[in-house]
Amino acid sequence: MAKPLILVTNDDGITAPGIKALVNVAKLFGEVFVVAPDKPQSGKGHGITISDPIRLRKVEVFDGVESYECSGTPVDCVKLGKTVLLKDRKIDFCLSGINHGTNSSINIIYSGTMSAAMEAHLEGIPSIGFSLLDYSFDADFSTAERYIAELLTQIFHKKKINDNFLLNVNIPALPYDRIKGFKVCRQADARWIEEYIEATDPKGLKYYWLTGSFNHDDTTEDTDNYALEQGYISIVPSQYDLTDYNKIPKFKFLEE
């Protein structure tokens, strides 16, 4: 029986420690093929490149794994992987990450990691985006690797899910024995309160640097943020359909 073909990507760049950790785990479950950005692309969301050429270059980054670095966005990586590099093959799964930093709550909207997974899901490929709640480049991914392997064992080997899906998985920056397990939950209703720091460059021209704080007023116990605060790995089944179905009846008066 042929091994599943697993497309691996990220938004931190092909040389980031997080994607190396994810490739190490993915190799245990199938044939791995990597297409990832040639530089950090955090916060690119679902952006695509339409006014500049996109370049692909084969690289030797992961032992025994065919890999390409892409000059475009994380979503570009998935599109080129599916329609160019693997156009004659069926991609069985897409794994994105492991992201350096959280993608819980509203962060899924801005995340290149999750947008890449969402693009694959949109194309009918079951997908998972992984994030570790540690922004440092030298973060320890060993615990994340062990829990990702446990999760993939449940999904790949036990085959409890056979249809298309998209999961947003966030992992606390805790030692292995302090993580309480997995918690399937909803996306917290929380958001960034943004500010811009104004400064002046050497030429006397103003520029702005985005900063801000995270506003977390959603304190119910069924959210991803709450699960993470309690020491669980949060798993949020997600989708690309942004329709607010509850509002459709309220706006039917516009048809009259």
Image (cartoon, rainbow, N blue to C red):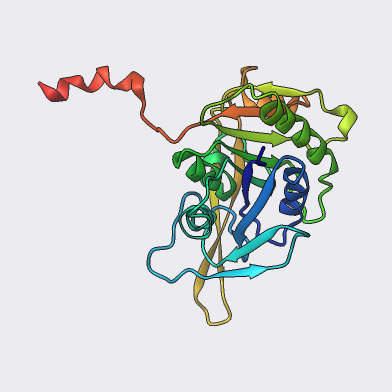
Q: Nearer the viewer, residue 77 or 170?
A: 77
**Residue at image coords 90%, 28%:** 177
Residue 78 on image: x %, y %: 52, 52
Residue 219's spot in the image, x, y percent? 62, 21
How many marks do you count on the picture? Answer: 0
Which quadrant of the figure contains the N terminus? Answer: top right
Q: Position of residue 54 (x, y in %)?
A: 48, 68
Query: Residue 168 or 212: which is nearer the viewer?
Result: 168
Q: Is residue 55 above or below residue 145?
A: below
Q: Residue furthest left?
A: 256
Q: Quadrant of the C terminus?
A: top left
- In the depicted structure, whether residue 154 falls above or below residue 207: above
In screen coordinates, is 196 left or right of 219?
Answer: left
Q: Relative to 64, is 4 on the left or the right?
A: left
Front residue of this view, candidates 161 and 141: 161
Toward the front, the furthest residue is 1
Which residue is nearer to you in this view: 13 or 222?
13
Residue furthest out toward the bottom:
203
Q: Whole-percent x and y of residue 55? A: 52, 70
Query: Is residue 235 toward the left or the right of residue 49 in the image?
Result: right
Q: Measuring 73% from the left and 35% from the top, which residue is drawn there?
A: 171
